[in-house]
Each structure stands twice: as structure tokens, then as C-alpha cells.
Image (cartoon, rainbow, N blue to C red):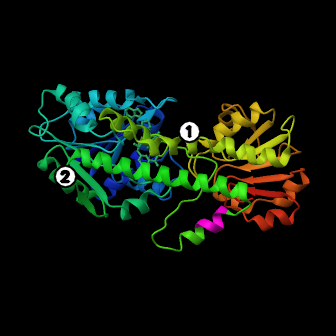
Amino acid sequence: MRVCVIGLGKIGLPLAAQYASKGFQVIGCDVNKDVVESINRGVSHIKEEPGLGEKVKAAVVMGLLSATTDTVEAVKRSDVVVIIVPLVVDKKGNIDYCIVDSVTETVAKGLQKNSLVVYETTLPVGDTRNRMAPILEKSGLKVGIDFHLVFSPERVSSGVMFDYLRNIPKLVGGINEESTRRGVEFYGKVLDSKVIPVSSCEAAEAAKLFDMVYRDINIAVANEFAQFCDARGLDVVEIIEAANSNPFSRILLPGVGVGGHCAPVYPHFLIKNAADVGIDLSIAKKARKINDGMPKFTVSILKKELGSFKKKNVLILGLAYRGNVKETFMSPAIALIKNLKKSGANVFVHDSLFSKEEIEGFGAMFSDLQNPSSLDAVVLATNHREYRDLDFAELKDKGVKVFVDGRNVVNKEVVEKYGIIYRGVGRS
Ligand SMILES: NC(=O)c1ccc[n+]([C@@H]2O[C@H](COP(=O)([O-])OP(=O)(O)OC[C@H]3O[C@@H](n4cnc5c(N)ncnc54)[C@H](O)[C@@H]3O)[C@@H](O)[C@H]2O)c1
């Protein structure tokens, strides 16, 4: 069995390496020439994924993994085609199909009889059947007869890929029964996790979206609880932990905001799907609004302690939307930068996953933690491992008066020991 993986990013490359580790011949496709060249040298361009570097090197050395920019040729030589490119929304929540449509057009050009096409990219409900299948049929092959088509949501997370690939069940929903059977057979061979067939590709698409919307709403509730606790002088973390001691309560933690390709994006897919059939997903919409408002709320916490921002030096710790992952898509840190600058602050950002140029590209000044020499406040925006051991004595020496813990991960007592005011999100 020869497998083609299209999109060798944070998710696609680990998938390609996983399939190769099971002894299958894998061709990875990407539009980025540097990514392709690096993989063909046996070097992973993604450094933050534990175990990925070793797996890519081993697969390339064994001749099981290669990469190319020629997707048509790779599809022609493959029995299974897995598509894992991004599908995102613009600022107004409109879906931008540009990449996934063009990849599908390319797949159609190389599609072979009897092959299996799998969409792992999260799609709105109905898109596998109604949008992707007609494009694939431009190949002259008939879906469900000449080739098989499946939607199988990717429910892993970058940074813990190989752990999740072992432990999170894989959902498979085909365009018809035979497609589902082929999909289940494929994943049974390449994964160690349980494979769960569902009744249709629509069921698999909806399962992924329900999961993400539920999580977004759960975080929004936690964020509202945080605002209540802030106003009442309570500690939201203590209270959520206490509430969750009941096994029926699974409240997530509040924070500075929600970013990345997934949680802020997929609710819009389902909101649109529902609107198309006259259903208003009002709770999902409200949750998006609450979560998008959290950077502003975090700035308001700091303002209460600092007073005016004029000419104050504020350091943001972390540009990435999530700890230990080099990704800025819809990162709350970007909204923090904008809000703080608008209020008149001099904004510095530290994130060792990003270069000086990358940080300056977001309109902030670069900090390597040594500069600037004087600081008024710090906002922790990303739960990077390295921020667990911050040197508060040094921060105090620089003049830091307030530390806002946007991820509620820092020990309050340690900060206060140095005479710095500690504020969390909902921990007044
Ligand atoms: N990142 C996550 O934690 C996560 C979790 C679950 C599911 N997903 C799904 O995976 C998708 C991809 O996420 P990611 O984090 O790997 O994204 P990424 O940005 O890290 O990688 C995407 C890759 O696709 C490549 N690409 C873009 N256009 C292409 C084209 N026309 N042909 C071939 N390659 C192309 C890019 O060059 C890049 O290497 C998401 O949109 C989502 O549907 C992601």
C-alpha cells in the first residue's frame, strides 16, 4: 500500500511519519519547496514535536518516506490519498476554501481507479459529499464506484501527536458503506488507536465540529466565571477545581483567549451549517464573542493595577497561541499587542520560538528577557514550559509592579514574595 499525505505541516508530517513507521511507502506533498527538501534530507522542519525528528530521519533512511511538490504525480502512484491542509475563516467568519479546493482539483488530476481519498482537514457538514466529491469526479471517475471517499477528522494536537495518535479513537465516515469499510481497514493498519466507523461522512464531519464547539462553549463559560470572580474578589481556579471534584463537572480553565486553527475557526463552520437549515446556534455564537473578548478583559485587569498605560513598558511573554507550539494563527497575544499599543503602552514580546523579525512583524518590540532594562508590567500570554521558572527577582529589579498571569499557571505566592502584584484571569 502506497500512501500520499498532502500538507506536511504540524499535523501532516507526523501522520506521514506514523504511516511509514508501520512499514508503508509514504509520499508527502507540500507546496513549500524548503519543507520538501528538508524532509528528503531526513530532517523535520517542525522542531517542537517530540519524537518527530527521529521518526522522519528513520523513515527517510529506510526509503519509506519521501517528499515532493508534484502532487499530481504522487497521487498517481498512491492507493490512499490523505488531505491535511488548513481550512480557515477570515475576520468575519467567512470560510476560505482556496487551499482545500485547489488541493482537491490537483488530486483529481492524478486520481486512480480503486483508490481511497481521505479528508482529515476539518470540513463543514456536507462538504465531503457535496463540495469535494464533485471536484474529484472531474477526474472522470465516479465516487463510491471507481474510487472511495471518506472523512476522518484529525482530533490530535500538535506537541502531543504520537501520544494522541495512540490514544484518541479514529472516527471514519464514508460516502457509502464500502468507503467506510476501506477507511476503517486503512486506519486499522496505520494506527494503534481504536478505529470507530460512523454512519456517514456527514456524521464524522459533525462529530468533529460538535467536539470543538462544546470545548469553545466550555471555555467561554469558564471565562464568564472568571469575570464574575474578578468582580467578586474570588479565585476562579480554586472554585473550578472544587466544582470539578464532582465527576459530572468538567469545567475548563479561563484564560487570555483562544487561538489556533481549530477552536476559534470550527464553530463558524457549524454556525453556518445550522443557519443554512434555519437554526440559530446562539450559544456557539455568544461563546465565540466571549472568548474573542478575553484579551481586552486581560488588558482591563492590568489597567486597574497600573492606571494609565502611557509610556509604560509592558512585556508580553509568549506570541504563540498555545504552549510549546510555533503557531500564531488567531493568537490572543496579537490582540494583546494591539490593545496595549492602542492604550499608549510600549509593547515588548518574548517568545524563543520566534525570531526578532517575526516578533516585530506583529508590531511589537523584541525582547530576549534581558531587554528592555526597565519594565512596568508583564503579561503571560502563552503557557510555554520555559515560563514555569521565571526569575521574579530579576523582574523586580527591572521595576515590574504588576504580573498578569493570562494562563493562571504561575504560583501567586512566589510572585508576591518579590513585592510584585499578582493578577490572574479571575483570580483577584
Ligand atoms: N494544528 C492542530 O493542532 C490541529 C489539530 C487537529 C486538526 N488539525 C487539522 O489539520 C489542518 C492542518 O493543520 P496544521 O497545523 O498541520 O497546519 P500547518 O499550517 O502547520 O501545515 C499546513 C501545511 O500545508 C501546506 N500546504 C498549503 N497549501 C498546500 C497545497 N496547495 N498543497 C500541498 N500542501 C499545502 C503548507 O505549506 C503547510 O506545510 C488544520 O487546518 C486542521 O484541519 C490541526
Name which residue type carries label 2.
Ser
- Quarter of the image for residue 134 reads top left
> Is 147 above or below relative to 397?
above
Does residue 77 show up?
Answer: yes
Measured as percent of width and height from the top left, residue 200 is found at 20, 48
* Element carrying mark 1: loop
Counting other residues with Cα less than 10 Å from the Cα at mark 2, is it few (<14), some (14-19), or many (20 or more)? some
- Residue at (88% x, 45% y) in the render: 373
- Quarter holding the C terminus? bottom right
Asked whether, in this view, residue 310 is left or right of residue 180, the answer is right
* Residue range of the region highlighted in magenta in the rendering: 236-240
Residue 199, labelled with which disc? 2
- Residue at (45% x, 32% y) in the render: 89
Total numbered labels: 2
Does residue 323 show up?
Answer: no
Residue 398 is one of the magenta-drawn residues? no
* Element carrying mark 2: loop
As rendered, which of 252 and 280 lies closer to the eye?
A: 280
As rendered, which of 284 and 374 lies closer to the eye?
A: 284
Q: Which residue is mark 1?
A: 330
Task: Decide whether the magenta segment is chiefly helix, strand or loop.
Answer: helix
> Is 227 above or below relative to 111?
below
Name which residue type carries label 1.
Met
- Quarter of the image for residue 385 reads bottom right
